[in-house]
Image (spheres, grey):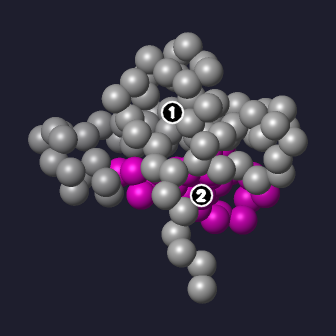
Amino acid sequence: MSERRSRRGSSGAGGRGRTRSRTARAELLFSVSQVERSLREGHYAQLLSPSAPVYLAAVTEYLAAHILELAGNEAHNHGERIITPRLLDMAVHNDVLLSALFDTTTISQVVPDRD
């Protein structure tokens, strides 16, 4: 007899049989389930492919990481240790592609009151 085992529901690593989330399988930090829920609740389309929220989460994570990296570079260039909305705005507007992408977007520079 062959020793075939069902892989359904197992991660394949270690043989413990634990399931892994779609976020973990895609090696992302942004939650695929949260993106899928937003897509479904937004009624953007009648049907949603299983890969759509994974792809959108990956693209969103990449954009966020890229913008934060550029803002961190701006902070370093200005001798600051904290990324502020002003530095985010400068980072976006100093990058040609991001500037075109966020052309009509306003980054709020209002700081909430501290008690």
Q: Where is residue 74 in the image (x, y as percent from the top left)?
A: 75, 34
Splitting the image into 4 quarters, where does residue 76 fall?
top right
Residue 8 visible from this viewpoint: no
Residue 108 vs residue 68, the one in the foreground = 108
- Residue 4 drawn above or below residue 9: above
- Residue wearing tag 2: 20
Which mark identifies residue 59? 1
- The reply, left or right, for residue 84 in relation to residue 57 is right
Q: Which amino acid does label 1 sit on?
A: Val
Check if residue 19 falls in the magenta segment. Answer: yes
Q: Residues within 10 Å of mark 2 (few under 14, many from 20)?
A: few
Residue at figure coordinates x 16%, y 48% from the top left = 43
Q: Is tag 2's residue or tag 1's residue first in the polypeptide sequence? A: 2
- Residue 46 drawn above or below residue 101: below
Residue at figure coordinates x 63%, y 30% from the top left = 91
Residue 60 visible from this viewpoint: yes
- The reply, left or right, for residue 41 in relation to residue 59 is left
Residue 69 vs residue 95, the one in the foreground = 95
- The reply, left or right, for residue 48 in relation to residue 26 is left
Q: Position of residue 98 (x, y in %)?
A: 52, 23
